[in-house]
Structure formats: structure tokens, C-alpha cells
Amino acid sequence: MSDTAAGPVLEIDDLSAGYDNVPVLRGLSMTVGAGEVVALLGANGAGKTTTLRAISGLVKVMTGSVRLAGGDLAGISPTARTLAGIAHVPEGRGIFYGLTVTEHFRLGLRPTRERIDEVLTFFPALRDLQDRRVGLLSGGEQQMLAIACALIQKPRLLLLDELSLGLAPVIVERLLPVVREYADNDRAAVVVVEQHVRLGLEIADRAYVLAHGELTASGSAAELRSDAERLVASYLGDTRS
């Protein structure tokens, strides 16, 4: 459950963004509060990844605004956004196969050993793999590492792009509760981009559905789970239902 009294952690207002001056997103508005998990759903090409990249500063904002805890992020570099508390786990995990697990933990903000140990409580399977090169890990272990590296930063806004990609459902079902627990315990705002509707809605408080770069539906996760017809129509970009 989110903290609404202090205002949203993430606020997107009338956002249009894309590549080479061609908009992929058009007029998107959404909010995420502290302690809240929001699922961003949609088919391939709907604009989900572009949304996360616009938040983290990797894609140019054409019109509209992205605000973190009330502060406009216009002109703020991706590195500065990371320092401000945004952690982005990209599709493909963003890890380095030639480095060990421990070397990944030492990248970036150089956390304390205490913080590393805290994060490893979420992923005990990584404890015995700290000296292993990442290229030798399984897909599930690599995804655990990618999320762990994000959590080590103690982000106030966590962005997860296609957490389930290439993983067996049983592995994903172990990872999703970690995301929920982090949001609840650390009062972080979380945006989960997911193609698999059931998985995305399982841990989310609310969801937004994109089709062809535009918002076609939004509501509580429970509402969207119970209204399959509306959800299917939203995926197709048909909002008449």
C-alpha cells in the first residue's frame, strides 16, 4: 500500500518520448507512490520499455514532464538520476558476463559489506556464488543478481523491465515476492514492465495498460484481474468496452 499524504514518488504528466524525433509514447500520465508496485502492461511495441528509459533519462522527452518526489528531472543526466534514487534493471539484465558476482556488487555506489549482506537475505542462492563469473550463472541467478545490484543502491524508485523474460515461471514466482517485500519494507516505489499479465498483476497494487504508445486502461490490479474482456480490449488498443 502506498503513502499518498506526501505525494507520489514518480509523477509523469502528458509525456511524449521516442527516438530520432519520432514519438513512441504519446500523452502518457501516471503516478507511483511510496510503497506501491505499479505494473506497466502491454504487447510488444506498446511503449513500455520507452517509458522506463524516459524515466531513467536514456530516452529524450519531447513534451510533458517526469518528476521524482516533486522535482522535475528535465536536464538531469542518467547518472545523476541514479544518484537521486532511481534504479533501472533493463531488459537483458544489464550485467557483465566476465565479472564475478562480488565485482558487480562493488560497481557504482560502492556499498558497505553490511548493505550487501542485507540484500543477500533476499537472494540467499547468491551467497555461495559470489566468486563465480556471471557468464557461468543460470538465467535465474543472473536475474537475481541484476535485481540485487539495483537493491544495493537502496533506490526510492525501482524500474524493472521484463523481469520474467527467458525464465521459467517457477523462477519468476520466487523473484516477484522479493519485489513486493522491498516495496513494503523500504517504502520504495516500483514500476514493473511485464508482458505476462497474470505475473504482472500478481504483485501490483495498480496497473496501466499501453497500446501503440497510448494509455488504454488503468485501475487497481484486482479490477483488471477480474475484467479480462476489458484487459484484452486494452491490449488491442480498443477502448470501447
Image (cartoon, helix red, strand yellow):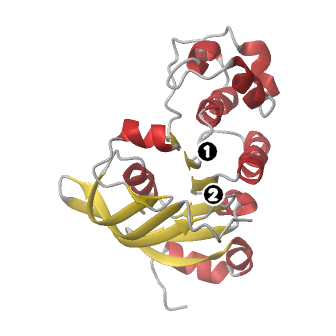
Can you give x and y, in whole percent of width and height, for residue 167 in the image? 66, 39
Q: Amino acid at mark 2?
A: His
Residue named by callout 1? 163
Residue 145 drawn at (x, y percent): 64, 28
Name the spot of residue 80 as percent of width and height, x first: 39, 39
Furthest toward the front, the residue is: 6
Where disc 1 sits, the SS reads loop
User: Residue at the spot x=47%, y=65% of the render?
Assistant: 11
Query: Which label sits in the foreground, 1 or 2?
Result: 1
User: Residue 27: x, y in percent?
Assistant: 35, 74
Q: CA distance from mark 1 to mark 2?
A: 10 Å
Name the disc covering residue 80, or none: none
Q: Residue furthest top?
A: 131
Query: Residue 46's image quarter?
Result: bottom left
Is the residue marked by circle 2 packed among few (<14), some (14-19), or many (20+) residues within 10 Å?
some
The foreground one among 55 and 41 is 55
The image's mark for residue 196 is: 2
**Mark sitting earlier along the chain (1/2):** 1
The answer, for residue 41, to whether it is visible in the render is: yes
